[in-house]
């Protein structure tokens, strides 16, 4: 899967947030997106997935050459896209097992062998993610801790096997043990398939466990520079001053 974000602009109300984002992503690679607070990182993920609060004011998002901006959110998901929320929502009345079974049926409706083995696969994935089997019968995210919600997001990802996922600050609020489990799930998909991801984060620590191939820096609603993992180390050493001062126009390092 190839995703091409071209000159994408968007606002919420009167507040213009994205100001011409250009970004290329593809399956088989892990991308990291970093930047100061308010630079537009989470807005970008919401716009890609069609959040109704955001108005696209220009540009396009192409998935394998097809502009998805006019698609409903479920249509975008059916293409093989996945979003792990920064703040996963609770869904009272819908159990984890029922939710995942229906999502799995939709994702793999033409693969009867795969859908027939759903329960076994789900239980195996829960063990892998160190989630108690009793959670199958609990309402999705209701009463879950922050770490349990984030593990549940990755469990959903393992169940649906997307081609490309955006992980919006999945590391936020996680202790080191939970972070390692979350990273383990992402790395498993990466090892077993052509899975790709865009990891939105403020911190190096998740990138110590999920090694990015490409790092992008966002500032004032644009992607202002891209490079290898050395960009993460430069941010750790210098913060964002070199971005704000315009020094990103020179080679990093």
Image (cartoon, rainbow, N blue to C red):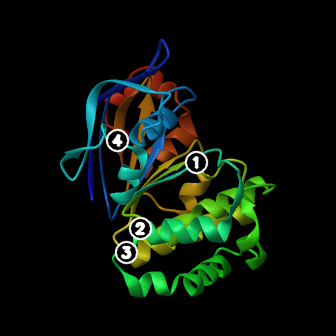
Judge whether residue 162 can be spotted in this image: yes
Disc number lying in front (4 or 1): 1
Which circle's residue, 3 or 2, is located before the other in the chain? 2
Q: Which residue is mark 4?
A: 226
Which circle's residue, 3 or 4, is located before the other in the chain? 3
Residue 207, percent from left and from top: 54, 56
Q: Compare residues 226 and 201 and report the one nearer the observer.
A: 201
CA–CA distance in space, label 3 to label 4: 25 Å
CA–CA distance in space, label 4 to label 1: 24 Å
Which circle's residue, 4 or 1, is located before the other in the chain? 1
Q: Which residue is mark 2?
A: 107
Which circle's residue, 4 or 2, is located before the other in the chain? 2
Asked which secondary structure carries label 4, the reply is: strand
**Picture quadrant of residue 9:** top left
CA–CA distance in space, label 4 to label 2: 33 Å
Instruction: Tell me which residue sits at (53%, 81%) in the image.
Output: 118
Q: Compare residues 153 and 89 and report the one nearer the observer.
A: 89
**Picture quadrant of residue 26:** bottom left
Disc number lying in front (3 or 4): 3
Q: Which residue is mark 3?
A: 193
Residue 137, percent from left and from top: 74, 71
Q: Which residue is mark 1?
A: 85
Disc 1: CA contacts within 10 A as few (<14), some (14-19) or many (>=20): some
Q: From the image, which quarter does the N terminus lie in?
A: bottom left
Residue 245, percent from left and from top: 44, 19
Disc number lying in front (1 or 2): 2
């Amino acid at each position: 899967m190839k995703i091409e974000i071209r000159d994408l602009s968007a606002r919420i109300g009167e507040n213009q947030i994205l100001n011409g984002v250009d970004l290329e992503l593809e399956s088989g690679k892990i991308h990291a997106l970093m930047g100061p607070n308010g630079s537009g990182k989470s807005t970008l993920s919401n716009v890609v997935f069609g959040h109704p609060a955001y108005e696209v004011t220009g540009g396009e998002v192409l998935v394998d050459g097809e502009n998805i901006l006019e698609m409903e959110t479920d249509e975008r998901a059916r293409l093989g896209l996945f979003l792990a929320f920064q703040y996963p929502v609770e869904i009272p009345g819908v159990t984890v097992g029922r939710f995942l079974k229906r999502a799995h049926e939709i994702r793999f409706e033409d693969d009867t062998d795969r859908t027939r083995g759903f329960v076994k696969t789900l239980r195996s994935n829960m063990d892998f993610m160190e989630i108690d089997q009793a959670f199958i019968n609990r309402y999705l995210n209701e009463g879950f801790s922050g770490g349990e919600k984030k593990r549940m997001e990755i469990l959903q990802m393992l169940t649906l096997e997307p081609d490309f996922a955006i992980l919006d600050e999945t590391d936020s609020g996680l202790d080191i043990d939970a972070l390692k489990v979350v990273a383990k799930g992402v790395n498993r998909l990466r090892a077993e398939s052509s899975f790709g991801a865009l990891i939105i984060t403020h911190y190096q620590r998740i990138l110590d466990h999920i090694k990015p191939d490409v790092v992008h820096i966002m500032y004032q609603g644009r992607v202002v520079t891209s490079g290898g993992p050395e960009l993460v180390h430069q941010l750790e050493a210098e913060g964002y001053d070199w971005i704000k001062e315009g020094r990103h126009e020179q080679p990093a390092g």
